[in-house]
Amino acid sequence: MKNIAIIGASGYTGAQITQLIDQEAQLSVQGIYVSEGSVDKHKALSSLYPYYGQLEYTLQGLSEEAKQQIVAQADAVVLATDHAVSLTLAAWFYEQGLSVFDLSGAYRFADNQQYPKWYGFEHTEKKTLDQAVYGLAEWNAQQIAKSKMIAVPGCYPTASLLALKPLTDFFAGSLPVINAVSGVTGAGRKAQLHTSFCEVSLTPYGVLGHRHQPEIATHLGHEVIFTPHLGNFKRGILATITVQLKPETTNTDIAKAFSMYDECQLVNVTHNQFPKVDDVVHTPNCHIGWKYDESNHHIVIASAIDNLMKGAASQGLQCIKIHFGL
């Protein structure tokens, strides 16, 4: 039995991974935590998220005493916290010998020069950063098993990378164009007028400047054009991607490349059939559909995930299970 502490458990992702860990026979929740100043401190998680069932956990403040208790009792810690908060917490828990699964972006780039530009802070924890591995579960299982510092990928990068990585050998040189739409839970639980459900109308945002663009490019090994959109639905992501492939590429080549997912329980690939968000909401799955025009050498790929599940919490759970050999 592995004991897992969840910090930032009052947010959408933190609550979701708490519910997932609670359902696992080989895992237990050591405790759930929020910042000492949080208005949610001392609240029952079930009072915030009744639709997850009777989660009999109370949110505790992350005091120094609580941190020491985590070190004494837990095998691992999940950080569902702000990037700048994860920066220091991840390093501290890692130094205490715990396995760390960070759901923020604080450790997704190996190059610490990326952080001031994309996240607005200097990365001061280079020793821990040097040990971090990118937790794209279907691609990096060996690294996830060996490292105690796992940076769980972003939601848009997960959908995009799962669709594109099998095909990199066939890229013709032009930039893959990724248009992706996310539900409003991707903006977090904190109330903001522009992400209020009644205010949202389908629109692009972060055009040619979203922090997930360099994350996708870094872990794909190829530059991309990435345009995210906010949709007026709760959860889910649909990424529609257009790529030019080398002239000699055939449908058979593409099918063979995607066959790498045949043994992956959570990734489903279909030819000439495209997924919709409802196929994956509340599941840990990724559905990929593709169609290739051999006359102009362009492929269109659609990739659907639940942003709170495969895009965050359930991929975090995958990483935990891979890491501990469960």
Image (cartoon, helix red, strand yellow):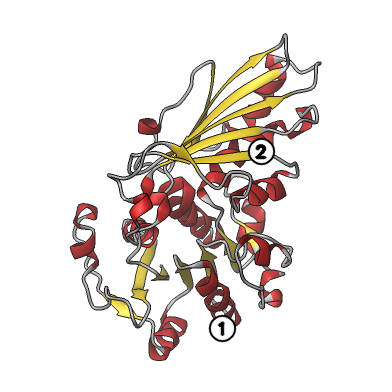
Q: Spatial distance from mark 2 to mark 1, Cα to Cα? A: 40 Å
- Seen at 65% across and 35% down, the residue is 164
Q: Estimate the x, y position of residue 4 in percent, counting from the top left.
A: 42, 69
Quadrant the N terminus occupies = bottom left
User: Relative to 304, is 60 above or below?
Assistant: below
To which residue does mark 2 refer?
225
Is 68 or 303 nearer to us in this picture? 303
User: Relative to 300, is 98 above or below?
Assistant: below
Name the disc covering residue 96, or none.
Answer: 1
Q: How many marks?
A: 2
User: Relative to 149, is 50 above or below?
Assistant: above
Q: Estimate the x, y position of residue 146 in percent, counting from the top left.
A: 65, 63
Would you identify the image quadrant in which residue 8 lies? Answer: bottom left
Label 1 SS = loop
User: Relative to 295, is 302 above or below?
Assistant: below
Is 227 or 51 nearer to us in this picture? 227
Residue at the farthest top position: 295
Q: Estimate the x, y position of residue 259 in percent, counting from the top left.
A: 63, 28
Label 2 SS = strand
Give, as a three-letter code, the residue at label 2: Ile
- Seen at 18% across and 64% down, the residue is 47
- Seen at 57% across and 39% down, the residue is 227
**227 relative position to 232: left or right:** right
Is 129 or 325 nearer to us in this picture? 129
